[in-house]
Amino acid sequence: MASTTKVSPVIVITGTPGTGKSTHAELLVQESPVRLRHINVSEFVKERGLYENFDAEWDSYIVDEDKLIDELEPSATAGGIILDWHACEPWPERWVDLVVVLRCDHTKLWERLEERKYPNKKIVENNEAEIMEVIAQEARDSYAPEIVVELKSECTEDLESNVARIVEWIRAWKKDHPEGERP
Ligand SMILES: Nc1ncnc2c1ncn2[C@@H]1O[C@H](COP(=O)(O)OP(=O)(O)O)[C@@H](O)[C@H]1O
């Protein structure tokens, strides 16, 4: 069987909605020393119909995770992607090189979600999830501790320093994988 060589890493950016995943991913695409494709998983699911149904009460799609994994497998195996989603547990461990969990003070998060015109119960649900560290715990439970990093995303300085830190991590990954990595 032909095996491909992964020349760029797979970076997961996760966190409660509103913590800054897409903002980080967009800046990282611009700053990265290697070509990265930003996959906003919620949009990807909608565009490709990778859901079982739509939950009108919570205004969200029930994702068909098997279909999602199948659809992403070629890109994840080839490398060079950022997976931006509010969950990280579905990704097979073999795909993932780095997991960035963004964290935000809950009052700030509340304001961001209000600005986004989320219904009140969705703001409450997400706020509680951030306080209870739901996504951070999911990342700790799903991946080796050395590939998981929690970063604060409360102001522009945080955004810039986080992206600079990930860029440094990518440079180190490239150094460690000069010929690429066989998945
Ligand atoms: N580190 C940050 N500093 C200031 N504003 C931020 C930061 N991260 C995100 N934001 C703002 O918060 C809002 C939500 O960010 P977004 O990237 O869409 O979050 P997510 O993708 O996690 O849902 C946006 O208005 C964005 O500009």
Image (tube, rainbow, N blue to C red):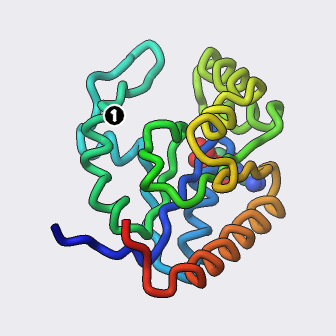
The percent coordinates of residue 80 (x first, y second) are 44, 70
The one nearer the camera, 25 or 115, is 25
The one nearer the camera, 13 or 78, is 78
Q: Quadrant of residue 157?
A: bottom right
* Quadrant for the C terminus in the image: bottom left
- Can the viewer see residue 115? no
* Residue labelled with disc 1: 65
Q: At 52% from the left edge and 37% from the top edge, which residue is drawn?
A: 87
Q: At 40% from the left edge and 67% from the top edge, which residue is drawn?
A: 79
Q: Quadrant of residue 160?
A: bottom right
Q: Quadrant of residue 112?
A: top right
From the viewer's perspective, is 44 left or right of 104? left
From the viewer's perspective, is 57 left or right of 13? left
The one nearer the camera, 173 or 109, is 173
The one nearer the camera, 78 or 37, is 78
The residue furthest front is 1
The percent coordinates of residue 108 (x first, y second) are 80, 37
Mark 1, Cα crowd under 10 Å, few <14 / some 14-19 / many 20+, is some
Residue 112 vertical position relative to residue 62 in the rendered view, above or below: below
Q: At 32% from the left edge and 62% from the top edge, which residue is drawn?
A: 75
- Can the viewer see residue 83? yes
CB at disc 1 and ligand 1 closer than 8 Å: no
The percent coordinates of residue 96 (x first, y second) are 49, 55
* Quadrant for the N terminus in the image: bottom left
Which amino acid, mark 1?
Glu
Q: Secondary structure at mark 1?
A: helix
Residue 145 vertical position relative to residue 162 in the rendered view, above or below: above
The percent coordinates of residue 55 (x first, y second) are 38, 18
